[in-house]
Image (cartoon, rainbow, N blue to C red):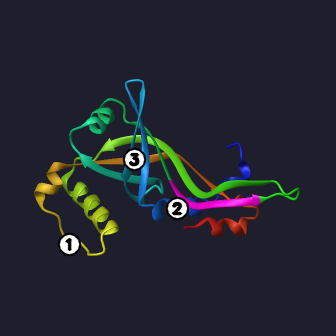
Amino acid sequence: MRRQDREIKDYSVILDIINALPIGHLAMNDAGKPYGVTMNYFSELDANRNTVLYFHGAKEGRKAEILSRDPHVYFFAERDNGPKVIVRPNGMRSVTNLYVSVAGEGVMEPVNAPNEKRRVLLAMANAFSDEPFDSLPDAVVEMTAVWKLVLNSVTGKTNPPLTRPEQQAASKP
């Protein structure tokens, strides 16, 4: 990362950002051409403390076809905190955008076990709904594709830059 002063080095802060952002973006390789899609996701830590993201969608379509051919993906999510006008000592003005962001890469795996699919879909439904779900119809579980992404690497970045370790908390959503 070129602007190391903006790097979020505290992994717990990165996890907080991932957990707070409801929507992310997946970049995929469609036979040599880039393809991106915006998706909501559910995140958790696995038994080895790896960050795992779950996505759902239709079993058929471009995204499903691409993932079946090349499951390597790049994930990113961000929160826009708005613009900030900067006035320099010489009076010159400029503008920057304030944000926090996370990015990572890994390999998507289909989740095919019905009980695991149901668990993930229920967790996603409850994460995005004000009214809790106790169950999902079998037909919904059957017709929905679920993918699991274990992030092999993950980074976080923020503007304004963090200058002291205790300021890490300032970037939390």
Residue that badge 2 annotates = 17
Check the image and report above or below for 123 versus 40: below
Q: Which amino acid does label 3 sit on?
A: Leu
Q: How far, Cα to Cα, is label 3 from label 1?
A: 25 Å
Q: Which of 77 and 44 is in front in this view?
A: 77
* Residue type at the position of mark 2: Ile
The picture places residue 152, in percent across and down from the top left corner, at 50, 44
- Using the image as rendered, state which of residue 171 and residue 159 is in the foreground: 159
Q: Which mark is residue 99?
A: none
**Mark 2 vs 3: CB contact within 8 A:** no
Say which amino acid is labelled 1.
Asp
Q: Where residue 149 is drawn, which disc sits there?
A: 3
Residue 59 in the image, given as x and y percentages of width and height = 21, 42
Q: Name the residue under label 1.
A: 134
From where the camera sits, is residue 75 visible? yes
Identify the element where label 3 is drawn: strand
- Name the residue at 71% across, 60% down: 85
Q: Which of marks 2 and 3 is nearer the N terminus?
A: 2
Task: Examine the structure image and report whether residue 83 is included in the region drawn in magenta.
Answer: yes
**Up/down of 99 relative to 25, above or below:** below
Is residue 46 visible in the rendered structure shown here?
Answer: no
Towards the viewer: 121 or 21 = 21
Pick whichever of labels 2 and 1 is earlier in the sequence.
2
Q: Give the range drawn in magenta.
A: 78-86
Compared across the picture, whether 45 is left or right of 61 comes to right
Q: Are the residues tagged 3 and 1 within 8 Å (C-beta)?
A: no
Question: Counting other residues with Cα less than 10 Å from the Cα at mark 1, is it few (<14), some (14-19), or many (20 or more)?
Answer: few
Residue furthest toward the right?
90
**Placement of the C terminus among the 4 image quadrants:** bottom right
